[in-house]
Structure formats: structure tokens, C-alpha cells
Image (cartoon, helix red, strand yellow):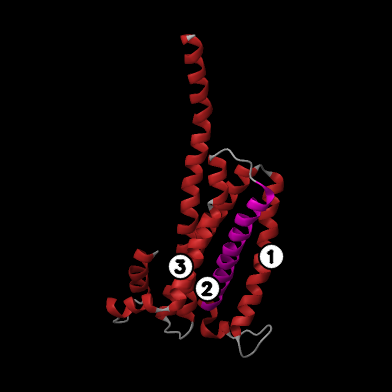
Amino acid sequence: MLLLTLPVIKASVFGYDVGLLEIYEIYHEWWYWVWMGIMVLAQVLLLIVPVDLSQRKQVSRRKLLVPVITSAFFMALILLTGILNVCVAIGGDDALEFHLLSQEYPIIDIVFITLILWSVWSVVFWRFRREDDDGNSFDRLIKWLLRGSILELLVAVPSHVIVRHRDDCCAPIVTFWGITTGLSVMLLAFGPAVFFLFAKRFGHLKPKEESESTVIENESD
């Protein structure tokens, strides 16, 4: 994510003469490092279950609840930014003039909607746990994150192109938020997905290796 920050911003501000030194200033913004910290924390939380499975440990309900809540939070962000991207692509800046709880602070409405979506996705993902075993349910969580992030990019990138050519004021910020969310979640899910594949492969190979070693010991006896 650190390496992709500069090229992604440079590609997103097409049509404007913005140098890399100006873009580099984002590394001095506190909110940038807060987002990086959130992503690192989420990556650690999503690796809890694969690590336990690779060591053949029984995953408790409490441990599985952690990746469920984490995945639900990012799916809520994906859905929220996807809806906002479609709205600004169609209605421009006027689409952002909605007021649910507060007329002065739109961030309150965004937080409220995010909490609702977070709760809904938490229930949906927790049902995976009831239908599958630990490994399969976690695998489905990661697949949903990867598919959701790809779909988010398919919506956010065209929306960003539309609003930039229309010279909107605030809409490009929303579409850029959608692009960064899609890329961040994709990179976030990629790590646990790869580790989980190695863990499953190791789990299939280990019994075979143990059985072969047992046969060798019996033959030597």
C-alpha cells in the first residue's frame, strides 16, 4: 500500500499538473497513517484463524468472531462506497446533499449508515459459521472480500472518470475513496488467502508424511 500510494494518486488526478513532490505530502497526513494502522490491525486479525488451522488447533467461537466482525466492517465500507460512487456518477455533487440525522455534519450520516451495513454483514457472515466448518467458513469470508473489492473497483474507476471529466467539486473525492477502498481491501484479503491455501495444503500433506514415516519404521523393525 505504501508503494502504491503515489502511482494511484498520480493516476487519479489526470488532467491536473500535480507533481510527485506534492503528492508526497500525503505521507505527512495523520489520517493516512491512521488508515494504514487500521489495515495492519485488520490483517493481523484475519490471520488468527489460518494460523490456528495450520497448527491443527480447534478454532473457538470467540476467535472466529474476530475475522467475522473484521470482514463485515470492510464489506460495509465496500457497499457504502459503491453506492456513493454510483450516486455521484449519476447526480454529481448534488447526490451528496442527503441528510438523515444531521444537516450540518454529513459524516454523522455516513457513520450511521456504515454501522447499519456493518451489523447486517456481521449477521450474514456469522451464518457461514453455522453452515460450514471453521476452514470453509473462513475461506468464504476471504472470497467475499476479494469479490467485493474487485466489484468495487469496477464501479469506482468508471465513476471516477465520469466525475473528473464533469469537473465536479466533491464527487472526485468520493470516487477516489472508492478506488482506495477497493485496492486496500483486495490487498488485505490477499495475505490471508495465500496463507490459508498454504495451510490447507500443509494439512493435506502432513498426514501422508506421517503415514509414510510409520510404514518406514515398521519395515525397519
In the image, which is nearer the foreground, mark 3 or mark 1? Answer: 3
Which residue range is magenta in the image? 60-88
Q: Which of marks 2 and 1 is nearer the N terminus?
A: 2
Q: Mark 1 points at which residue?
A: 119
Q: Name the residue under label 2.
A: 85
| Cα–Cα span, label 2 and label 1 | 22 Å
Residue 81 in view (yes/no): yes
Residue 35 coordinates in the image, percent (x, y): 48, 70
Residue 6 vertical position relative to residue 46 in the rendered view, above or below: below
Farthest bottom residue? 104
Q: Which residue is pictured at 52% across the width and 38% down the height? A: 200
Q: Label 3's element?
A: helix
Q: Which residue is pictured at 50% across the width and 77% down the height? A: 174
Q: Verify CB contact (< 8 Å) between mark 2 and mark 1.
A: no
Residue 148 coordinates in the image, percent (x, y): 54, 59
| Cα–Cα span, label 2 and label 3 | 22 Å
Q: Earlier in the sequence, mark 2 or mark 3?
A: 3
Q: Any mark on residue 98, and which?
A: none
Residue 19 in view (yes/no): no
Pick the front one: 13 or 74 = 74
Residue 216 coordinates in the image, percent (x, y): 47, 15
Q: Any mark on residue 36, and which?
A: 3
| Cα–Cα span, label 3 and label 1 | 23 Å
Residue type beneath disc 3: Met
In the image, which is nearer the foreground, mark 2 or mark 1? Answer: 1
